[in-house]
Image (cartoon, rainbow, N blue to C red):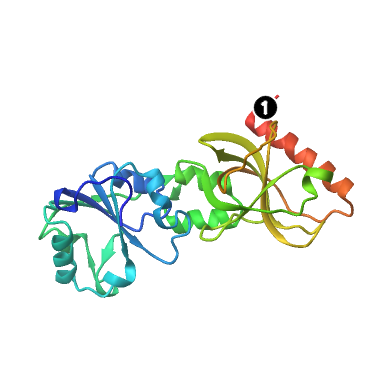
Amino acid sequence: MSNTFTISKDNITSLAIGGFDGIHLAHQKLIKKVEALMIVSKHTSNLTPGNYRCKFVKKPCYFYELESIKKLGCNEFVDFLKNEFKNLKKIVVGYDFKYGHKRSCGSEELKSFFDVEVVDEVIVDGISVHSGVIREFIKNGDIKKANRLLGRFYSIKGSVIKGQGIGKKELFPTINISVCDFLLPKNAVYASKILLKGKLKNSVTFIGVRESTDGCFSVETYVLNEEISNIPDEIEILFCERIRDNKKFDSLCELKKQISNDIKKAKEIFGIV
């Protein structure tokens, strides 16, 4: 499986190998050195699940399930690579790269068969850049830290669904989405952007249980300074900064007042007058 780049695997001479979940700053150092990526998919790949990685990579991506290769011995893995990429000469991997049965082999074993370049650990603000570290920041709502290690805004994608119906009438009109495979940030209110018809629009996004209304979990976003019509079936939300944690309000009047404050804070973040 690959993205829209159609180069034949037989013509690939250099390859980066790894999970590449998140396509973060450390991944980017590997990617810029090769022609294509061999992406080993894991069940924990929820920062950029499936083909969503391809959005951030302008090179061919070839996907392989971890289960199909994790039991291969060192020589079996080398044979697998030579069979899949017949003209492969150079491999680029991270400093902690391991492969084969029980992760028993590493870059040194590959050097007997290929030109191997090992990329050193990437440190940002004193933090080692790893997908696992980024996941923890996202779970804790530390979006700015996660974005710093990603080198971009953390984003999710979801299908547009029907909301409560009270937003437009009594509060603020929101776009509600259902998210399946992505890791959701901590339940909170965020300054965000949404991608609509190829354009980024500033917004405020709520994630969590609507304790002040129907008690249901939701992911919904309000677009600043613009009334949205003809909403597509699917939208993308980019998270910029956490505004506040969720709380319960005793009335819709109190909730509306807080949302107004959230909107004001988001505008300050985006520099909107």
Left or right? Give the position of 206 relative to 149: right
- 149 or 53, nearer to the observer: 53
- 138 or 195, nearer to the observer: 195
Q: Position of residue 229 (x, y in %)?
A: 66, 38
Residue 194: name its quadrant: top right
Left or right? Give the position of 179 relative to 89: right
In percent of the image, x 10 and y 60: which residue is there? Answer: 112
| Quarter of the image with the C terminus in it | top right
Dot 1, crowdedness within 10 Å: few (<14), some or many (≥20)? few
Residue 49, compared with residue 191, is above or below; it is below
- 139 or 87, nearer to the observer: 87
Residue 36, compared with residue 261, is above or below; it is below
In percent of the image, x 45 and y 64: which residue is there? Answer: 44
Q: Position of residue 174 (x, y in %)?
A: 71, 45
Residue 200: name its quadrant: top right
Q: Position of residue 129 (x, y in %)?
A: 42, 50
Residue designated by label 1:
272
Q: Is residue 203 visible?
A: yes
In the displayed orientation, state which residue is furthest to the top.
273
Amino acid type at mark 1: Ile
